[in-house]
Image: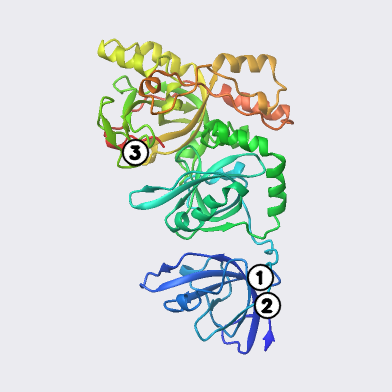
Amino acid sequence: MNFITFDELLPGIKNWAATVQVIDKQKPQISKKGRRYLKLLLADNKANKIDALIYGSDIDFFRNHFQIYRRFVVSNARLQYADDDFTVERKTCTMIIDNSTVVEPLDEQQPPLLPPLYQFTPFKKLCHQIDTNSDLDVIGIVIHVNPQSTKGTTPIRDIVIADQSSMAIILTLWGEHTTDEGQIIAETIHTQPLVAALRVKATSYGTLTLSTKFASCILINPPIQEGPPLRQWAVENNEAIMKAITEKTYESPLELLPPPDAEDITHISAIVTAPQKKAFWIQGTAKLLDRSQKFWYHACPFYHKSIRSTPEYKITCLSCQSRNHVIARPRITVDFADWSGNITLDLYGKDAQQLLPYKISEIQQQESENNIPYRAIEECISENTIICFIKKAPYSFEPSATQKYTAIVAHKIRLADRSNKLTGAAGTSGAQKYTEGTNAEDEQEPMDIENEQDTATPSVTPNNRAQGSTKAKVDDWFLTSLKITESPPKKQRTAKSDDEEQSQ
């Protein structure tokens, strides 16, 4: 038998054998033609990769083979040029394994380290892929596991993972990933297992989270080179990890999406013409779009979906299955402008509250008295520069010039503070670019309805950034701010039913 490597494999070759290591194993799926198949990704001793497929009843035939990380000798499997619909990696050919293929496991107590095959995305870079169709590979230490729940009839479980940047983020496991890998992780959480999540997506739900897809793969304690340094970091930073769990930093917009560097801010004119679905950082000033809008809506305290009910009654949210009283949640629509153009922007929750001079309970009282102080509200909104991370509104079907956008997170900067920066801090670093707006208490737990409605929302104080920003970079940032002028004529607010109002 001729032992060869994957780069020598071609359709039609005979009497060959190869030592393979299983580095990826997906859940069985159904093809477009209705055929059941299982996808594997195999690596050889030279770190070459090849896709392998097992079909139909052969999946059960090999149920005791091809365990993740283990090595096998595979002989004379069928080879064919890959169909793009079935490939995890674009390779010259695909290996078809059936019950006539010779498969022999290697007798090894521990599998060797996997070759350096993965390109893991650092958590600090995830914001650039939020709400796109990109498949992301991430690696982290599991520091917390939530109980299993359901979304409709689908089981889900949130786990919290952290990487060496000390950033913690929620990874939501769906379906079989919940009942399989999720259960193993829950049972071993006391060991803080290492997890590599392959082909997951970044979403703006809850500010920034990760979520599995059907084709995702969750590797638990994989034998990879990145593992030992990450485990050592977890041991040395156990106190910081416990603090992150206690303070729930994985739910904090300040931690997940802090203000960006100046070079990451995009002009509005470039956003409006951008063809791809993407989130952007923008900086500008806001004006109340019109006085006919309502500054709050009744919503589920957890899912934040608009619900036509009143706080006196408990209801069951059909989106998250929780049973609670609805709360009054802030919402405003503004005309947001920078020097290049303007857009219509919706802000929700804390992002909206920080721009209002009154608590929602006060605005409700003013509404009942038909005495809303619009001028004070307009002045409060327009007196600040705002840095927003935005995405196109999910229900926006208007032409590009009038499309609506939703703020994922908004950071407020007072204009007076910005002027002080210009006169007295030309050489400051990126850590000092942004200033705190208010010092109100944090929003209370959603179950406390009265506190939820009566609590002011704080402006944001960003985390310190790495030192060393140059004077030129800071000057560019301030010059961009100075270009903000009076916005073009206001657009009319797009009509939208309460059913469509939802925080992202």
- In the image, 257 versus 415, the foreground residue is 257
Task: Specify the amino acid type for callout 1.
Answer: Asn
Dot 2 alpha-carbon crowd within 10 angstroms: few under 14, some 14 to 19, many 20 or more: some
Vertical relation: 182 (above or below) 413: below
Q: Quadrant where the C terminus lies?
A: top left
Dot 3 alpha-carbon crowd within 10 angstroms: few under 14, some 14 to 19, many 20 or more: some
Q: In the rendered view, how is the structure colored?
A: rainbow
Label 1 element class = loop
How far apart marks 3 and 1 lie (CA) works out to 48 Å
Task: Quickly name the residue at label 3.
Answer: 322
Image x and y of residue 17, in percent = 64, 83
Q: Residue at x 25, y 32 (%)?
A: 308
Label 3 element class = loop
Callout in the foreground (3, 2): 3
Dot 1 alpha-carbon crowd within 10 angstroms: few under 14, some 14 to 19, many 20 or more: some
Q: Residue at x 53, y 46 (%)?
A: 129
How far apart marks 1 and 2 lie (CA) works out to 8 Å
Q: Tell me if label 1 and label 2 are in contact, CB under 8 Å.
A: yes
Task: Specify the amino acid type for callout 3.
Answer: Ser
Q: Earlier in the sequence, mark 3 or mark 1?
A: 1
Callout in the foreground (3, 1): 3
Image x and y of residue 152, in percent = 33, 49
Task: Quickly name the residue at label 1.
Answer: 48
Task: Quickly name the residue at label 2.
Answer: 5
Image x and y of residue 165, in percent = 66, 41
